[in-house]
Structures are given as C-alpha cells and as structure tokens.
Amino acid sequence: MRMSGASFAVESDGRLMNALYRTVTSLVLIASLAAATSARSEMAVAYGLGVTSSSLAPLLKTVTPSVVSIAVRRPVTEDEHELRKAPLVPGQDGTQAPTAEGHGSLAVGSGVVIDAAEGFIVTAGHVVDRATTIYVVLADGTLHPATLVGLDAETDVAVVKVRAPGLMAISMGDSDQTEVGDLVLAIGNPFNIGQTVTSGIVSALRRRSFGKLGFEDLIQTDAAINLGSSGGALINLQGQMVGMNAAILNSGDAYSASVGIGFAIPANTVRGIANQLIKYGVATHGELGVAVSLFHTDSDHKPSAAGRSGVVITRVAFGSSAERAGLRVGDLITVFNSLPVRDPVDLQVKTALLRAGDVVELGVVRQGKAFAVLATLDSAGQKPS
C-alpha cells in the first residue's frame, strides 16, 4: 500500500511537474512573443515612414521612385571584340550586348535622383565611363536621354542630368552615423532584370583595397549587390541613402554574382563629390602634404597627449600646405573642420573630399598644448619629401 501510494505520489508529482513546466513554458513563450511584438512596434515607431513588423512596403513606396536604371552605349574595345564570339553575350553590367561592328556595347547600371528640380542623378563612375549615349529609365518605365555632368574616377562617382517630369529626389543620410549591424536595403537593377530590393545589414565599415578607387572608405554589406546594381542606393530603415552601391568582392569571374560581400560608397562621399561635379564639372582632391601614423600610447601605455586620439605627423612635404601652415613632425592632428580624426585613412578621406584651395581648420596638439591651425589645401598628388 505504501509502495503503491508512494508510486502514485511520485507519478502524480511527475504529472504535476510536467503540467507546471508546460504552463510556465507557455507563459514564457507568450511573454517572449509579446515582448518581441512590442519591440517591433517600438522599432516601427522609431523608424517611421510606415515601417511595420510585417512589411517594408510602405517605406519602399517612398524611396524606390528615386532609384532609376541607366543604359549606356560605349565603344567596344579590342579585348571585348576578342571575347565576343557569339551573337549575344553577357555585357559588362549584366545585360545582353550586341557585337555588330560600329554599334558599340550596351551596358546597364543604376542611379539615384538627388535633385528633382534640376534633374541631377548620381551614379557610379564606371557605369557611364566612355559612354557615347546615356539613357535613364525611371521607375515608371519611361525612357529619357541624359547628359553627363561630370565623372570622378578617383571616387567612382558620376552625375548625369535628365529632363523629365515627376522626378523624386532621395533623402541623403549622414553616412558617418552608420554603424555595423544597421539594417539596410540595396535598390538597383541587377542583371537588367528590373528594379530589385535586397536586404541585409552593414557588415563592416571603412573597407579599402577593393578595386581601383583612389580614396576608399567603403561600407560593406551582405545585402545582395550584383552586376547592374552599381549606382543604386543603399538605404537605412529611415528611407535615407547612406551609400551608393559600387562593387562586389572579385571572385575571379567577370560575371560572378553576389556572395554576400558587397561595397557601397558612403553617402557623405557621394554628396561631396556630386556637389563638386555639379558646380565645376570636375572634382579635385585636396591634400595637406603630410605622412601620418595612428596615434599610440607611450611605453608605459599611458596616453602621451592627455588622453587625446588622432594621427601623428611623421613627415611634412617641402613647400606643402602643411609646411605653410606651420605643422611639424610629431604634431598630433585631432580635429578636421570640427570633426574628430580617427586614423590616417580618415584624415586622407576627409582631405580628399575637399577641393584644392579650400581652407580647413585643424585641431593640433604639440607638446601637450592644443591649438587650431588653418591650412589651404594643395592639389592631391604631391608626396611628402
């Protein structure tokens, strides 16, 4: 009897514990789902522009009209003639390109409207390089001839102009505020199949040495970017353009697809170069004429400049902007036009986005004393002696 009773008690306790476990698990699951729903709701409110937990469609309806397709015709090079043995072969940017003599090759990329009133559209420089004819295809499918305003090969940024009704300009964000982990969407015309939206995150920042760009400070993303996407928009969930799609990791195949490693030119770079191209037709790049290294602590691992960060000047070019401004080897540059200097690449990019002749204000620390210096930038290309 006792054994039976004991057995019954154990079995009853087991069933009771299982029931309690299922109840607690259910409550935890319900609470988790409620918390997740609340978080998504808060996220939707924070992002605005109609973003909901179930769809990005309301956001995209406000942004996609600003992203266009760009078709160009350019001369066929001798190498391209050798490669083209069939009547139709894949074009450089994912299109089908005719091989007939005298007709040139047809390539397709993407672009983004940045000034609706004036018809200015920004795109990747390699999309319109050597173009003899440029057409813009708007989101509504209408085709319009365009003219090249300017192209800067160093940053791979170009601007074209089109006369068309109903253009919608994109909202430009501050790419300096972009962080690894931010959710982003890439919009473009991959392989000329039509406007396409892909999603991902910012995988890394300040990537360099991917391609021929002279002033690289690229945003890496796993949002799919493919041939034909170049010149399209990388946007955040506030509908702001934080980058311009520019490149994918080179796997050795000229027509390779995305492997989840794509690169975009930061919006601040695009904005600065586009403004130069619109105003002057060309972009020039400023230079201080210094070689710098990342600031390090002293041998005791204590900040040798009162906890400041920046770059240390290791060489000053003779007759350069830096020398004329009185900068010396050993000076610590901490600020560039009110913005902190993070490392040598940061200083190079900040300087290169300004024109030769522009005056910049530098925050400098020398022997523990901080002061400001005004320097008139030289043209890029002068090397420290």
Image (cartoon, helix red, strand yellow):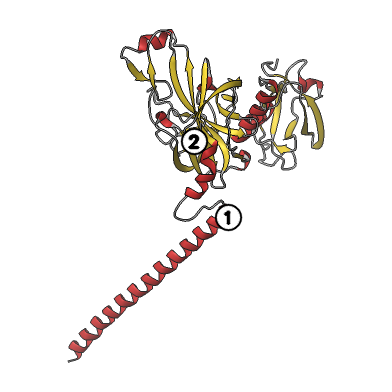
Q: Secondary structure at mark 2?
A: loop
| Residue position marked by numbered label 1 in the rendering | 46
Nearer-the-camera pick, 104 or 199: 104
Q: Position of residue 192 (x, y in %)?
A: 41, 29
Q: Position of residue 324 (x, y in %)?
A: 81, 20
Q: Give above or below for 64 relative to 16.
A: above
Q: Quadrant of residue 228?
A: top left
Under mark 1, the amino acid is Ala
Q: Are marks 1 and 2 in contact (CB under 8 Å)?
A: no
Disc on the earlier residue, 1 or 2: 1
**Quarter of the rendering occupied by the C terminus:** top right
Q: Residue furthest front?
A: 165
Nearer-the-camera pick, 331 or 29: 29
Under mark 2, the amino acid is Ala
Q: Secondary structure at mark 1?
A: helix
Q: CA distance from mark 1 to mark 2?
A: 28 Å
Mark 2 crowd level (few <14, some 14–19, many ≥20, 10 Å Cα): some
Q: Left or right: 123 with respect to 293?
A: left
Q: Could you tell me if residue 370 is visible in this image?
A: yes
| Residue position marked by numbered label 2 in the rendering | 139
